[in-house]
Amino acid sequence: MSALAADTMWMTHRRLQAFVRQPAFLVITLVQPVIWLFLFGSLFRKVVELPGFGTSSYLDYLVPGVVVMSAVSSNMWAGMGTMEEIERGTLNRFLTTPVSRAAIMNANVVEQAVSTTIQSVVIVLLGWLAGAHYPGGVAGVALLVVASVLLGTVFSAFSNTIGMLVRQRESIIGINTFLLLPLTFLSSAFMAADLMPGWMQAIAKANPVDWAVRAGRDALSADPDWPAVLTRGGALLALAAAMVWLSTRTFRAYQKSV
């Protein structure tokens, strides 16, 4: 095992210990997705009757959208944890140790990935209990979770980058508020793409949130379009790797400033 992997595992274990001691946090992060799942599922259940919607159950259609929205919403706050460690001096103390600098940032991302996985599985189970069907089976659910984790990695690394650069909570809150709903509604999370205005369809094609929603939804279908699933999944993987690299580079810039 490489030194980077070992350091990342150690740092992740440290963060997960704190996560386990605060299980209420996971419950709190699930409140909004559950409200969206059941509120939107009931409010818009007849929208599937529109010509061209493409499915007979809005709940089936909605679950992947809520899973992805939850991943975006929770991971956007990763930078707040980074800010807290800066303010407490924890981050600076780690700079005096031989631990890999990349591992310090990567551990935050891995912790968020674990949290996102748990949240995604819980939402899928709640959807199933409410009557949602998953023709793609366990494999389809697994691919939906992977897509949500990759998208979550994009936004957790992005949030860490912002935290390193601006070092102000207000900026992170403002950016999160500005991005969450537009990115969600400029995707097919809640409405079939064919029924969206042309300009929204164009934006959705370049929206990573839409990539994750479509990859997960296709994987859950009875007859998945595997080339499309793999293409969108590959794009998410590439974007996640780029954002993790950027957050690591930003941390190195922070290190030089202290």
Image (spheres, grey):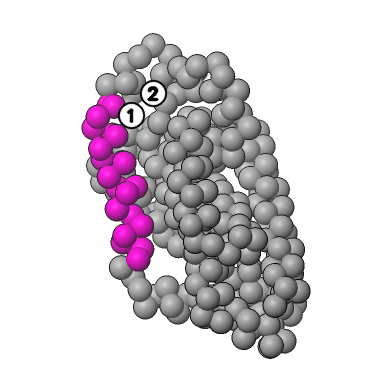
Amino acid identity at mark 1: Tyr
Q: Which residue is mark 2?
A: 55
* Residue 12 percent coordinates (x, y): 56, 75
Q: Residues within 10 Å of mark 1 (few under 14, many from 20)?
A: many
* Residue 85 percent coordinates (x, y): 53, 75
1 up-or-down from 143: above or below = below
Amino acid identity at mark 2: Thr
Residue 75 visible somewhere in the drawing: no
- Identify the secondary structure beneath mark 2: loop
Q: Which residue is mark 1?
A: 58
Q: Residues within 10 Å of mark 2 (few under 14, many from 20)?
A: some
**Residues shaded magenta:** 25-45
Q: In this orientation, which residue lies closer to the viewer: 84 or 1? A: 84
* Residue 38 percent coordinates (x, y): 26, 40
Q: In this orientation, which residue lies closer to the viewer: 179 or 62? A: 179
Assess whether mark 2 and mark 1 are in contact (beta carbons under 8 angstroms).
Answer: yes
**Image quarter hosting the N terminus:** bottom right
Q: In this orientation, which residue lies closer to the viewer: 2 or 7? A: 7
State how far apart marks 1 and 2 are (Cα).
7 Å
Q: Is residue 180 left or right of 160 when viewed as pictured?
A: left
Inspect the magenta stretch and tell me whether residue 31 lies in it: yes
Tag shown at residue 38: none
Q: Quadrant of residue 161?
A: bottom right
